[in-house]
């Protein structure tokens, strides 16, 4: 089964989430919403901001690769199957990524 996760948005973070599916979805959303370098003691976590100020088509290509790599590294229970973008209505130069993921079954 695939799930869609979008960057940003206001969501409550649950520490030590008991439900594994909810945990994976929350972790992927956090990866998408965190600029690389902004987490003290965990500077590689998140998505690089090097796509800022690039043409939209170049930024999308760059971000697709970065998102896939970051999710594979920081949330190995998720497999990225597709990355799409929408533009912010208030700021058309801002891309908001949405990731389609498959969640690996828990071996229970």
Image (tube, rainbow, N blue to C red):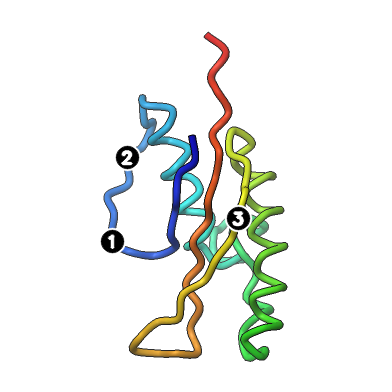
Image spot of residue 106 (x, y percent): 53, 19
- Identify the element where label 3 is drawn: strand
Q: Earlier in the sequence, mark 3 or mark 1?
A: 1
User: Which residue is labeled 1 in the image?
Assistant: 10
Give the side of residue 99 with respect to residue 68, left or right.
left
Q: Is residue 54 above or below residue 19?
A: below
- Identify the element where label 1 is drawn: loop
Q: Residues within 10 Å of mark 3 (few under 14, many from 20)?
A: few
**Residue occupying the point 43% across, 59% down:** 6
- Quarter occupied by residue 43: bottom right
Image spot of residue 82 (x, y percent): 60, 55
Residue at the limit of the structure toward the top, as seen here? 108
- In space, the residues marked 3 and 1 are separated at their CA atoms by 23 Å
- Quarter occupied by residue 62: bottom right
Nearest to viewer (mark 3 / mark 1): 3
Nearest to viewer (mark 3 / mark 2): 3
- Quarter occupied by residue 17: top left
Image spot of residue 4 (x, y percent): 44, 51
**Residue occupying the point 32% across, 40% down:** 14
Q: Is residue 42 above or below residue 77?
A: below
- In space, the residues marked 1 and 2 are separated at their CA atoms by 13 Å
User: Which residue is labeled 2 in the image?
Assistant: 14
Tags 3 and 1 touching, CB below 8 Å: no
- In space, the residues marked 3 and 2 are separated at their CA atoms by 26 Å
Q: Residues within 10 Å of mark 1 (few under 14, many from 20)?
A: few
- Identify the element where label 2 is drawn: loop
Q: Residues within 10 Å of mark 2 (few under 14, many from 20)?
A: few
**Residue occupying the point 44% across, 53% down:** 5
Q: Which mark is residue 89?
A: none
User: Which residue is labeled 3 in the image?
Assistant: 82
């Amino acid at each position: 089964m695939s799930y869609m996760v979008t960057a940003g948005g206001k969501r409550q973070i649950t520490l030590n989430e008991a439900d594994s599916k909810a945990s994976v979805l929350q972790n992927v959303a956090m990866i998408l919403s965190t600029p690389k370098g902004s987490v003290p003691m965990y500077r590689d976590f998140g998505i690089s901001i090097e796509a800022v100020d690039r043409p939209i088509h170049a930024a999308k290509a760059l971000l697709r690769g970065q998102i896939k790599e970051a999710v594979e590294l920081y949330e190995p229970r998720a497999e990225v199957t597709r990355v799409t973008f929408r533009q912010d209505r208030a700021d058309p130069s801002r891309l908001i990524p949405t990731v389609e993921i498959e969640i690996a079954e828990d071996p229970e």
